[in-house]
Image (cartoon, helix red, strand yellow):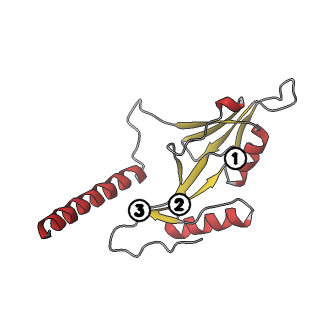
Amino acid sequence: RGDRADKRAITDSRRINLIAKETVAMAEQPAPPEGGHQMISAEFLVNDVEANLEFFERLGFPRRFIDKPDATGRVPRASLTAGQMGKIWIRRAADCEIRPSPSINIFFWIDGGPDGLIAYRKKLADSGVPVTAIIDEHGLPNFNVTTPDGYSIAFFTQYVPPGKPPVVLVR
């Protein structure tokens, strides 16, 4: 049994180290290669563009573009800016097209480390946006919000290396 426990501990340690390395690679912001990908854009299919636009603005994303209202008087499409390289598109769609999935995660980086993340979460909560507790997942502190149509959006900050104190969880 001792050999089996030792092998499992080594396997667990390697897995944790691999996850930590992948997490750091995800958080790093390398310069894009020449002719490479300069921007990321996420599109949310929604029932009500105006409600989602207001929600994303409460999260701090500035308006970028708003379509003129259509024949029903409703806005069919809008977009917001997400940092220097991101765009969020919101498009009205039929109910059958709106399919939030727990297997797709959209993360936005928050500057300022764990203190910046805690302050941003508090700002959202104080403005009435429902937020989850901060969790320290693989050394990346993060929390989630849910859009009016059920999409999960996470906010995270810098990697906390092993041996450093973990982020104090905020509920």
Cα separation, mark 2 vs mark 3, equals 12 Å
On the rendered structure, is 168 left or right of 122? left
Residue bearing the label numbered 2: 111
Q: Is residue 41 above or below residue 23?
A: above
Q: Is 123 placed left or right of 21 in the picture?
A: right
Instruction: Give the quadrant of the C terminus.
Output: bottom right
- What residue is disc 3 on? 159
Earlier residue among tags 2 and 1: 1
Q: In the rendered view of the protein, which quadrant contains the N terminus?
A: bottom left
Q: CA distance from mark 2 to mark 1?
A: 17 Å
Q: Which mark is residue 93?
A: none
Residue type at the position of mark 3: Tyr
Q: CA distance from mark 3 to mark 1?
A: 27 Å
Kind of residue sitting beneath label 2 = Asp
Viewer-side label of 3, 1: 3
Element marked by disc 1: loop
Q: Earlier in the sequence, mark 2 or mark 3?
A: 2
Disc ID at residue 62: 1
Estimate how packed mark 2 is, as few (under 14), some (14 to 19) or many (20 or more) residues with alpha carbons within 10 Å: few
Give the structural element (helix, strand or loop) at label 3.
loop
Residue at 50 percent of width and 65 percent of height: 135
Q: Position of residue 14 (x, y in %)?
A: 23, 58
Could you tell which of marks 3 and 1 lies nearer the N-terminus? 1
- Disc 1 marks a residue whose amino acid type is Pro
